[in-house]
Image (spheres, rainbow, N blue to C red):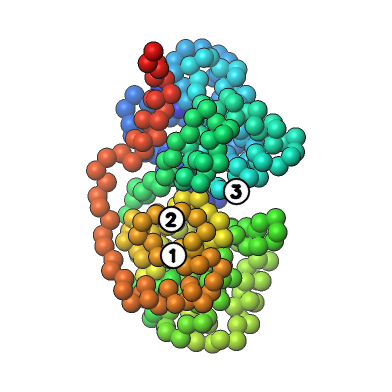
Amino acid sequence: MVVFMMGRKPPPVGGVTVHTDRLIHWLSNLPDLELRHVDVRPASILRLMIYQLLRRSGQRIIHCQISNYLGLVLATLAKKIGPPQTRLVYSVHSEYWPKEQLLPDHPRARLVQWMMRSVDLVIADNPHIESDMRRYAKRTQIIGPFLPPDGSVDAFDLQGSLNLESLDAPVVVFNAYKLSYRNDGREIYGLNTLLDAFFRLEVALTLIILIPQLSIAEQATLLARIDAEPRQFNRGRVHVISRPDIEGWKVISKANLFVRPTITDGDALSVREALYFGVPCICSDCTIRPDGVVLFKTGDAADLAQKIVATLKSAHSHTPEAIKANPAFKFYSAYLSLFEVPNG
């Protein structure tokens, strides 16, 4: 079987790009599977189209990880020009995707709905997404996107002389690959809620704000907002890090607490990483969250502040279990099922 994985790998470092990179890595370690990465660049897309036109035998999967509807257009076209043994798999990582791409009364929505008829399997990150996609897809399946990193965590400097192991107070980490906003202007990742909560606290804590894709203007605005904070206690312990070369899991794994204060979410990679490394994790209650996290009311800074203090007091860390089986096998099994002959 040949699997064409359509999507970006880091950079930029984000939940979907990291997931795609790790999925390619783990699938490549499975036998009887040939994995080919299809980047979003025209040359890579063209190679896929040529392969589909010229190679007319053999089972193949086109697995599209591109959230932009144009990615689905290209994946659909690649399937249609290929042989009958081609199956199209589409991953939906955001609860916003069905609402933005399928529901509006817009010609684009009708186009996306038409393309969904060619999708053999939609892989959804959580039950909310699966429920929204069920009416448009031939088949849906929930597979959590978390795949563990394959590497070790060594000591490293975040920025200049800032080293996580030398800080004088417990470390709280916030991680988002960029600042994003809804159509109504609300900031999706909840950073302002976290800052409001953090500055309410009068216990010594360090806050690492890790945003790899942060523009100079955005960084200046964020630093100005922190400098203008009238509550002084922990102001000198806030560090804004914007470096695309730092992998978020390496920072999260050394934290005392991870906070995910988003106003909407899928199955967040950073949350799964925190749980995997035994780091206590606080999340907004905007969606279904995995077992083991502490929930706070979405947008409620006072509730978040109380949960930060309580969670740090009761936290017990543990070492992640060794990986005993290839964690991408669930995706491989889903691919194989698309070629099964129905009974009867």
Is disc 2 surrounded by few (<14), some (14 to 19) or many (20+) residues within 10 Å? some
Q: Is 263 on the left-hand or right-hand side of 221?
A: left
Residue 34 sits above or below residue 265 on the image: above
Identify the residue at image location x=56%, y=48%: 95
What amino acid is found at the position of numbered circle 1 in the picture?
A: Leu
Where is residue 300 shown, x and y percent of the image? 54, 71
Residue at 48 percent of width and 37 percent of height: 123
Mark closest to the chain's N terminus, 2 or 1: 2
Q: Hey, what amino acid is under mark 2?
A: Arg
Identify the secondary structure beneath mark 3: helix
**Pointer 3 with pointer 2, Cβ within 8 A:** no
Query: Which of pointers 1 and 3 lies earlier in the amino acid sequence?
Result: 3
User: Residue shown at 52%/27% (left/top)?
Assistant: 138
Asked if residue 5 is positioned above or below residue 49 in the image, the reply reads below
Instruction: Give the SS element for disc 1.
Output: strand
Residue that label 1 marks: 295
| Placement of the N terminus among the 4 image quadrants | top left
